[in-house]
Image (tube, helix red, strand yellow):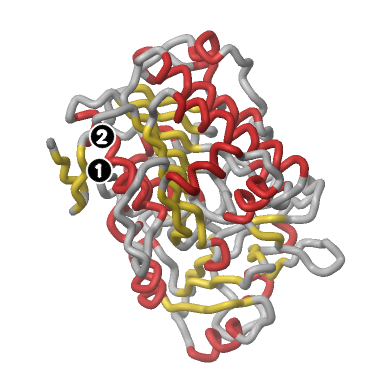
């Protein structure tokens, strides 16, 4: 059996059609409610016949760090992507981490393509496409920009004709459904041997587990996974992060505005607060998540740390070194402090900088330790060890190295 070596891990080349699915924001309770409601028959059967566990995602529990961990098989301390957004000390600017220049490790997708495997990558939003497809020969496009694909740029043309769907709205469940329809068609037309499908968490930000809207989304997901399974595809399903309500008892957003708070504390007046959840699509979460990093012009003092840690809603305050070690993050891309909020709390900068007018329903978000638990499911048998701590970035190992 031909083996690939990628970032210190070994993977077999696939001998059957294979897919890894990252369901954005998939708190395990969504699956439990879907199975309980009887709308996920494929998953219900697969939980009995395949292999499953609850795994840990990367903290910060955001999209970019976890998708890149999944496709590299390692933590951000190796691949370098520690948020959707960061402060670049060299240029003294705040920037998106969408450019492949921030990536420090090769992907398994690239290694598979280099080994002759026909790889297809389909994402919801274009923000991830270039990172996931970096140096990879194959098909790579987003449903968001599906009308703009070209053979030269994306490895395929006329995606809309193949999928037979119009370009979905960015804020819609259809943005994710387009991905699954595309995945099914790519396998059906024998255009690929391996796929990575990564959805959007629009539904999870708006609808709690067990609600009609959430169950309808997971019923759709289950139908397409069932189609892939029926076609003989080996399937691994995981998530980039979980999702929780972030509200007060009256349903209003439960926010700690760190910049406003720091202005009142000794040593915090000139602090720069970075919210790594920030991306171009903030209508459904207002750029509010449960993780932040803080740059301090005058350095860290025990008094400042203690004052922040004592605030209701703050779970933990870490120094740069502590956070880098505990969460396996690149220390040179963190601030002086890393702050993690409790389950029902999110962190902001200044109240005046966050537009929450687009929140039509009570705020749901992610980013903290409380959103770290995610599903890891395989429709094959994997030699799982009961006491082992599995990570969402074990998905490629599970699906490529199964029994």
Provide the residue designation for mark 2.
Answer: 110
Do the residues under discs 1 and 2 have CB atoms within 8 angstroms? yes
Residue 191 tag number = none
State the residue in front, 118 or 90. Answer: 118
Q: From mark 1 to mark 2, how far is it between C-alphas?
A: 7 Å
126 relative to 114 in the view: left or right: right
Q: Position of residue 360 (x, y in %)?
A: 81, 46
Quadrant of the frame with the C terminus: top left
360 relative to 88 in the view: left or right: right
Provide the residue designation for mark 1.
Answer: 106
Taking the spot 74% from the left edge, 51% from the top edge, the residue there is: 355
* Displayed quadrant of residue 312: bottom right
Query: Is residue 97 visible from the viewing direction of this image?
Result: no
Q: Position of residue 184 (x, y in %)?
A: 47, 22
Disc 2 crowd, CA 10 A, few/some/many (<14, 14-19, 20+): many
156 relative to 211 in the view: left or right: left
Q: Position of residue 59 (x, y in %)?
A: 46, 63
State the residue in front, 299 or 345. Answer: 345
Q: Position of residue 154 (x, y in %)?
A: 39, 20
Taking the spot 43% from the left edge, 78% from the top edge, the residue there is: 319
319 relative to 280 in the view: left or right: left
The residue positioned farthest toward the bottom in the image shown: 303
Taking the spot 57% from the left edge, 39% from the top edge, the residue there is: 200
* Displayed quadrant of residue 168: top right
Quadrant of the frame with the N terminus: top left
Query: Is residue 299 visible from the viewing direction of this image?
Result: yes
Disc 1 crowd, CA 10 A, few/some/many (<14, 14-19, 20+): many
Q: Secondary structure at mark 2?
A: helix
Q: Secondary structure at mark 1?
A: loop
């Amino acid at each position: 059996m031909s083996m690939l070596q990628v970032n210190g891990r070994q993977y077999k080349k696939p001998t059957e059609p294979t897919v890894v699915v990252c369901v954005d924001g998939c708190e395990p309770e969504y699956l439990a409610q879907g199975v309980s409601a009887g709308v996920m028959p494929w998953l219900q059967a697969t939980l009995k016949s395949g292999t499953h566990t609850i795994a840990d995602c990367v903290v910060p529990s955001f999209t970019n760090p976890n998708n890149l961990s999944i496709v590299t098989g390692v933590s951000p301390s190796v691949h370098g992507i520690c948020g959707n957004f960061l402060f670049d000390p060299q240029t003294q600017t705040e920037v998106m981490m969408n450019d492949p220049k921030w990536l420090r490790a090769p992907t398994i997708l690239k290694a598979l393509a280099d080994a002759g495997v026909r790889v297809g990558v389909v994402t919801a939003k274009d923000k991830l496409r270039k990172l996931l497809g970096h140096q990879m020969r194959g098909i790579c496009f987003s449903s968001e920009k599906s009308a703009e694909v070209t053979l030269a740029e994306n490895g395929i043309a006329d995606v809309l004709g193949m999928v037979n769907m119009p370009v979905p709205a960015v804020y819609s469940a259809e943005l994710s459904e387009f991905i699954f329809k595309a995945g099914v068609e790519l396998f059906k037309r024998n255009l690929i041997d391996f796929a990575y499908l990564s959805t959007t968490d629009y539904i999870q930000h708006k609808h709690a587990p067990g609600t009609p809207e959430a169950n309808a989304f997971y019923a759709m997901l289950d139908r397409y996974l069932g189609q892939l399974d029926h076609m003989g595809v080996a399937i691994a399903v995981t998530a980039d992060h979980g999702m929780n309500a972030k509200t007060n008892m009256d349903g209003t957003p439960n926010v700690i505005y760190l910049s406003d708070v720091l202005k009142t504390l000794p040593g915090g007046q000139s602090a720069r607060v970075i919210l790594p959840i920030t991306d171009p699509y903030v209508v459904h979460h207002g750029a509010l998540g449960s993780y932040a990093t803080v740059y301090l012009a005058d350095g860290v003092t025990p008094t400042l740390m203690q004052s922040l840690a004592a605030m209701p809603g703050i779970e933990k305050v870490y120094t740069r070194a502590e956070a880098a070690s505990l969460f396996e993050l690149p220390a040179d891309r963190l601030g002086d402090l890393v702050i993690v909020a409790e389950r029902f709390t999110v962190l902001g900068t200044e109240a005046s900088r966050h537009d929450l007018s687009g929140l039509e329903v009570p705020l749901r978000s992610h980013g903290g330790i409380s959103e770290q638990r995610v599903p890891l499911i395989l429709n094959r048998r994997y030699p799982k060890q009961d006491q082992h701590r599995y990570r969402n970035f074990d998905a490629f190992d599970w699906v490529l190295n199964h029994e």
